[in-house]
Image (tube, grey):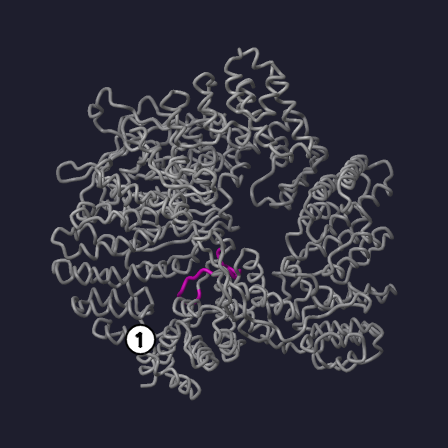
Amino acid sequence: MEDLLTYQYAMPSSLVKKGNAEELFLAKYSEIQKNTDAPCFFWGNVKNPFIMARCLITLSNIVKSSFNMSPFQMALLKDPIVTAGNSCVRFEGFSHCAGVYARVDVLPDGLDGEFLENGTTNVDFNQPMLMALGGIRQNENVLLSIGQKEVGLHLEGEKVIERKVPLPTKWIKGLSTVQIYLSKAERVHTFNKIQTQQLFRGIPKGQVKNDYYLVVRGNTPMFTPVKSLNAICVGGLHRLRLLEPLLPYIDKMQVFPHPTMQSTTWQLYFGDVRFSFSLSRDAWRGFSGEGAALEALINDVSDEWIDALDKYAYANQAFNPTLFAIEEDMAFDTVDNLTARLAAMGLLGFDLDENRFFYRRLPFKLNRIMSLNPRMKGANKLIEDGKIEIISQTKGRVEARVEGSGVRHTVILDEKGERCTCEWYSKYQGERGLCKHVLAVKKLTK
Amino acid sequence: MKDKLLEFIENQDRNGMITFLQALTIEERRSLVPEIEQYDQLYDDDKEKKRAPGAWDKRAVNNIAAFVCFPPAEAKKIWRWRMPKPEELDKILPWYCPKDFGDYQFLRSYEYLIKWEQAGYLSLTEEEILFTLPASILKPIPGNRGRHYTLEAIEKYPITLDEHIWYLFYAPSNVDWADKWLADNKDKKETKGNWCDTFIKYTSEGRIDRMRVLRESLQTANRNFNKTQTGWFVDLFMALEPTQEELLNLQDELFSALTSVWSKPVSNTMKLLKKLAADQNFRINGFLPSLPILLSSEVKSVVTTTLAVLEVLLKKHKGHQTEISINLCTAFLTKDEAVQKKAGELLVKYAQPTPELKDLLATYVEHLLMNTRTLLKNYLPDTEQAVALTPEEPIIELRKLISDENKIPELKSVEDFAFFLGQAIDLSEPFHFDHLLNNLIVWGNEIKEEELVLLEPIFQKVYKTLGKWESPKLDGMAHIALTNYGDYLIQKFSGKLTKLAKMKEKYAAIELKRAQNSKNYKKRAVNIEERDVSIYLKGFHQIAIEAVDRIKKQHKLPLLSTPTHLPVWIDASVLVERLVMYQQQHIAPVDMDMQLAIQRCALEETGEALQKARKQLSGELKELMIFLLDTSAIPQGAFAHLAWWATVALTRLSSQISTKLQESEYKRIPQECFTGNYQWVVFMEDYMTYEYNPEIRGYDSYPAQRAKVGMNTPKCEYNEDEHPLFYEYLLQDSIQSEPVDFLFGAIPNNPDMLLSQLTTYFANCDMWGVGEQHIAFQVARVLQESNTPFREMHYFSFACLLLGKAKTCQDYAFSIWLEKVSADTLDSCKLGKVLGKLESLELFPLKRLTDLMTASMLRVSDKHNKALFSMIESLLAELKPQPIKNLKKLLEIYKELLALTKEKPGAETIKQLNIWTFESNLKKVIKQILK
């Protein structure tokens, strides 16, 4: 039977009038809640509540959207997660199909309040609250409360909100994988509001099946189906339309493609609020299945490190791997790839503007995250069953045979990279992460 | 007991069976299971019995027994159509209700589900209610396939109206479908009523809360419903005819509906707000934040209604004039003259030309039409005059056919060969097939015994693909060539390839079984020469046969036709080198391989290759290559291989060879194939059209006319006995369904005939399906990659792409236009003429082109404006005296271009305009043009 994830909220999120101000209360829940958790992560004023509200509505639309799933699957919505700490608040979510990732960052200057605790949590996004968000006007006074500041407010006997959804495997996997893509992306374009609006007007109506390319001709950015040098490739272009309601309010937009165009990130700026929007390579491809994180998971990360990270870092704090290695007395060669490994485990997020990882532990049990990579599981099984034969291992080259179903696959690791004779490799040529055969050989010969 | 069971079945006695089963103990029921199963099996096995009269009913009685007698775990698996009907279950459930009855796969009907839930037989989920409730107002009419409207089911239990009916507002359901079904129902009298009527009835009776229905209907605009269902709730809202007071109470929901992703709720809400705007209780502060979204909407009606609302608000709320004026600028993103005019007028009337407003407007200057600029003269910054009317010229990269960027890498080792085969067997790139064959020749015999393991997964994949029902790509030629190679290896390394031998054996068994089951089954594991292939593949087939033969003979000479550069070009120098190799080894080129190589030769910067050919080749091949590579060369020498000379003439579009050809069998090839001067025509075709008539539940037919396009140039007629050319093979069959990129990849230099066939096909059906749009996309790609000046068929295809339905293809065509105009390689007058010819009979809606012009083609650069101007002038000259739809918009664009380019209308255009000057809707714009 499919695993269930149960959201348990003490009460529903809501936007309520309190004196002269409105209070946006976000109910939180995490299955890895720390015992020392204060009831509230953040409580204070939001300087641009109108923009934050619009961004949260868009985020909820992204979470609700799906570009390759049935309406019934879509009805089982996942709640976004929030990370509060280090003077800023980040809301993250994924489309249901895990092909679109979005994050709203409310930066330090956009908040005026107290961080009573730091951490990451699921927050209840219910329809009445979203409706109410739509009513927030510019220059309104809005208090944001992530969690309940005064425990006393929670009435005894009041019904706990409980919502069961199938464990959002793709979602959780995508949340960790996308950070690795983000860390490799580089800023290529900056467009002003009018350029951006004009650009989006060129998106064809309906579902776009062909790849489109973002090019700049003269001073005008445009989408074209014609491939050209230096053009940014965008698959499933129609997904960008999710951003349209925000465009009239932006100061600028920046575009960050992945070096091999496996994803694109579109970052909208509204003063102290930022909206990041990442698209997978194609509408039918979720970040979850891309396997970018797989290589990072070859080496195990010890529990002590995770505990150390929990103790040492606090939410949204920039992650410095060198410092971490010194603190934990690790060999520096172990630090190589450490960030990717921790990101793959859901412990780090990536900030494109700062160009660095930040600590953010996904509010899901670690064993859930680790159990979500079937290719990694397959690789471990190959090793356990002794199906790998290392034919030769010299400096710079490994050749191995891996027993497959009815045939033997050949894996070669050399200066050309990794190659395997299996169907997965033949089809994707390594673009969608390593196959289980390569993973197993790498793990065995590391 | 068993006899009794069979008796009820044979008598088709459903009620009798129910009574009989009720009287049995659980053990007795279980003892009947083998009999029930056997009876079912009998019907499955015996086709005669299955078709016998009454068989269906007999089985239905057996199904009742199955439900009652099977152990629950088995009964749960029974398919829905083998379960008793709901009315039968209704009789059974009071005395036999299995645990988890809700999980059984019976036919869901709300009427029974609700009854059974109330009786405690099952518990309903929200999904089940949503799935069944919409159809609950449709009751089947006995003896008729129709249904009639009834509220019986939903009025039976209070929970339906108290709770279940509200679910319809929260999650997707078939509620819109149920209404549509009733609308199409033939017995109108009986079926009066639908879900909309139902809501009207219950709200007016006070049975359900009217305000809640109104509120929830509005909120569905943002609940992620699909377009149709969102639209249905808008219709419901309107059908309830909300009063002014109700609307005022629903302002929050109305403002929220303005952020819907669908346009219907937005445009509808704006219509309502237009009525409310003047009301003193209208909450302007709630509305204004939505302005940026509304005014930047791509739906014109939303922008115009918003402007109308703003006009009211500007008049009434002086305190908000500045805020509104600033927002008004957003409307200038729309390049529609009426919208810009209205927004400009409002600005002039209500806003002061403050420095802030001037600065803001300055950012929109590029988007302002000439009339708007004049209107807003005082609002534009003083430096506006210095602002260029059009942006700078876009920089376009020029591509070369042969460069390092598009070079196809060569294999370096047996390992590379093995990995390449795994990739190429999917044939995802047009060059994969050729490289697969060529690498088999070059590397196939390099493999050593210990390396054979590398190939195991490839052969497994090949046999797996052949074992599927669908024919592999290119009639399985690549796969069969590989199986032939596998057979060769088995023989060569006798006894060492046990896994491959087993795969072969296993596959042979599958084929044997298939051949036994179907007389028409054609074996796939054959020698390549025995494989029957489609006509268009015959040229490739000959090459594949040659490849397998060379492997067997261990002859490593590469094929001539293997592409060196993407997508399928052959570097002319490399081709000459290959031919030199052939001459040195005294090997005659294979006919089809030679023809394909000629067809794919990149005829750009051929100097070096020409020099090599002159120096290193001899005889006919030398003369042939000179004729191919030197455009001024005249064919000379002995024409021993006339087919090759004909292919060269076709490839470089030279009619110089035609005198020789006219005396030969190739005189059958239409002259246009050598010149590119194809003839085509647009005409009106009579046809019978069909329209659905709900009264008769059938279609009415009546004669009508439609515009069509056709070719005057005849198709290449091929005759197998007359030594067809590769080119001729390729253009046979119903090529529309074939891999188009692969076909173009065989004749990249002269795709004109293929362009004519494919364009006629997708133009006449207006790219109606995914397949046609894919073809059009491939045609666009070919035009874009073409480095030679456009010929007649290029212009024809290009014009159809600009006017066609698929936006992606139109975008592609626009990019081509941009590049070609920048590079001065497009004849705008010619393009305009072709567009005009197509529009003279309105083969495509002109609106598609005018929309593209407004959104993208206008104001790219001065050069592009001039090109567009010339294009429109030629287009107008082709139109008939009777104005076509949307001509006004085209003339407005023409007028804008006159202002932008400072040109004067041409004499031909003036003549045309004078003809249309009496048309009421064109009069004004023509006057402005001719002033």
B118 on left or right of A342: left
Q: Amino acid at mark 1?
A: Met
Q: Position of residue B235 (x, y in %)?
A: 31, 49
Residue beneath the point at 37% across and 28% down: B114
**At which x and y percent is residue B597?**
74, 65
Instruction: Tell me the quarter of the picture where residue B779 sits.
Output: bottom right
Few, some or many residues within 10 Å of mark 1 (<14, 14–19, 20+): some
Task: Report the front residue among B808 and A153.
Answer: B808
Q: Is residue B403 above or below residue A280?
A: below
In the rendered image, residue B437, in percent from the top left (x then y), is placed at 75, 54
Q: Which residues are magenta?
A: A217-232
Image quadrant occupied by the C terminus of chain A = top right
Q: Looking at this view, is B120 or B926 the one in front?
A: B120
Q: Which residue is mark 1?
A: B370
Is residue B370 visible in this depiction of the protein?
Answer: yes
Q: Is residue B139 above or below residue B601?
A: above
Q: Nearer the viewer, residue B88 or B557?
A: B88
Q: Is residue A223 magenta?
A: yes
Which chain hosts label 1?
B
What residue is shown at x 64% (from left), y 66% (from top)? B402
- Dot 1: element: helix
Q: How many marks?
A: 1
* Residue B272, placed above or below residue B630: above
* Residue A77 visible within the image: no
Q: Is residue B486 left or right of residue B59?
A: right
Q: Position of residue A248 (x, y in %)?
A: 30, 55
Is residue B828 inside the magenta stretch? no
| Above or below: residue A408 compared with residue B284 | above
Quadrant assignment, res A152: top left
> Along the line of sight, which residue is nearer the eye, A354 or B693?
B693
* Residue found at the very far bottom of the displayed protein: B907
